Image (cartoon, helix red, strand yellow):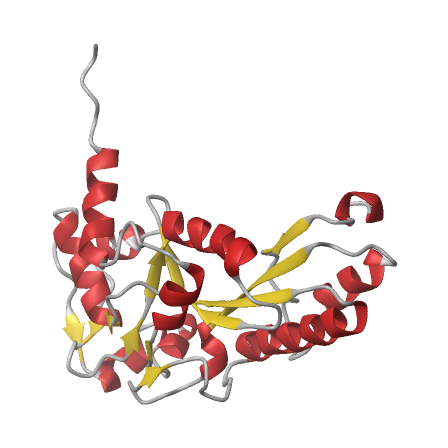
Amino acid sequence: MTQQSLEGARVYYFAPPSATGTHDNRISNWLSSIGAAKPAVIIYLSTTGVYGHCHGEWVDEQRPPNPITDRAKRRLNAEIQLSEWGKQHAVPVIRLRVPGIYHPDKLPMASLRQGRPILRPDEAPFSNRIHADDLAQICLAAAEHGKDGELYNVADNDACTMSEYFIKVADAFNIPRPQEVSREEAEQLLSPGMLSYLQESRRIENRKMLDELGVRLQYPTLNEGLRNIRIAKQPQPNP
C-alpha cells in the first residue's frame, strides 16, 4: 500500500511477524514505510499466546502478558511497537488477541486420518478457538466500536482442552478418534511444534469483546461451528 492509499484508511494488519527472534522486524519496517500517512485506525491481530501458561485459569484483558515462546514474544513486541507509534502519530490502534482460528480448510483432518495420537484429555491443557467467519465480523466491529488503545480478547464461548478439540472434530466428520497417550508417551511421539502448544493452558474470557464491540457470535460453540462446516462440505444435489 502506498502512503496515499493509507491516508484516512482503516488498516487491518494480519501479516505474521518475523520468523525468528523476539523482535518483529516486519512491523518495524512497515511502520517506517508509512511516512507521514495517517490511517483512520489500525486493527492488529495479535495472539492469546502473549499470556503464556496460565494453568487453565480464566484470562481477561487485565492479566499481564507473560509470553513463553519466541513467536508469542514477537507478537507482544509488535503490539508495543504499534501502540507507541499510534500514540506518537495520533492514530488509533486497537489490538485483538486471537486464539486458534478454524474454518473448512483449517481443521486437523490430515492429523486425524494419519492416526496421530493425542494427549489424554485429563492431562491436556485448555485451549481456545474462534471460527473464521466470527473473526471477520469481530475485526469489522473493532473498527466501528473499538476504543483507541484498547485491547480485546477474541474467543468463542467454548473453551475446551486441546484433546477434546481433536475428538470433537473426529466425531463431527466420522473419523476414528485418535489414540490417547500419556504426557510421557506424548513427548516421544508428538512433534516439537505440537508439544509446544501442550505447554500452555488458559481459558480466554471474551466478555469485553461481546459487550464493547457489540458482537453476536454466529458460532458460539465449537459444535455449532463444526456442524456448519459439515453441512457446507456435503455434496449439493444437482438442480
Nearer to us in this view, 3 or 170: 3
Side of 108 where 97 appears, left or right:
right
Q: Note whether residue 175 is visible.
A: no
Find residue 149 and report its image quarter: bottom right
Picture quarter with the C terminus: top left
Q: Please provide percent x and percent y for residue 63.
A: 45, 87
Nearer to us in this view, 179 or 24: 24
Q: Please provide percent x and percent y for residue 172.
A: 15, 50
Q: Please provide percent x and percent y for residue 160.
A: 22, 71
* Residue lying at 25% horizontally and 50% vertically, measured from the top left: 225
Picture quarter with the N terminus: top right
* Residue lying at 45% horizontally and 74% vertically, measured from the top left: 48
Nearer to us in this view, 123 or 66: 66
Q: Note whether residue 38 is visible.
A: yes
Q: Please, which residue is most extreme toward the right here?
A: 36
Against 71, residue 154 (above or below) is: above
Against 47, residue 222 (above or below) is: above
Against 83, residue 27 (above or below) is: above
Q: Please provide percent x and percent y for residue 120.
A: 17, 77
Find residue 71 and report its image quarter: bottom right
Side of 7 where 147 appears, left or right:
left
* Residue lying at 26% horizontally and 66% vertically, measured from the top left: 157
* Residue lying at 16% horizontally and 62% vertically, measured from the top left: 167
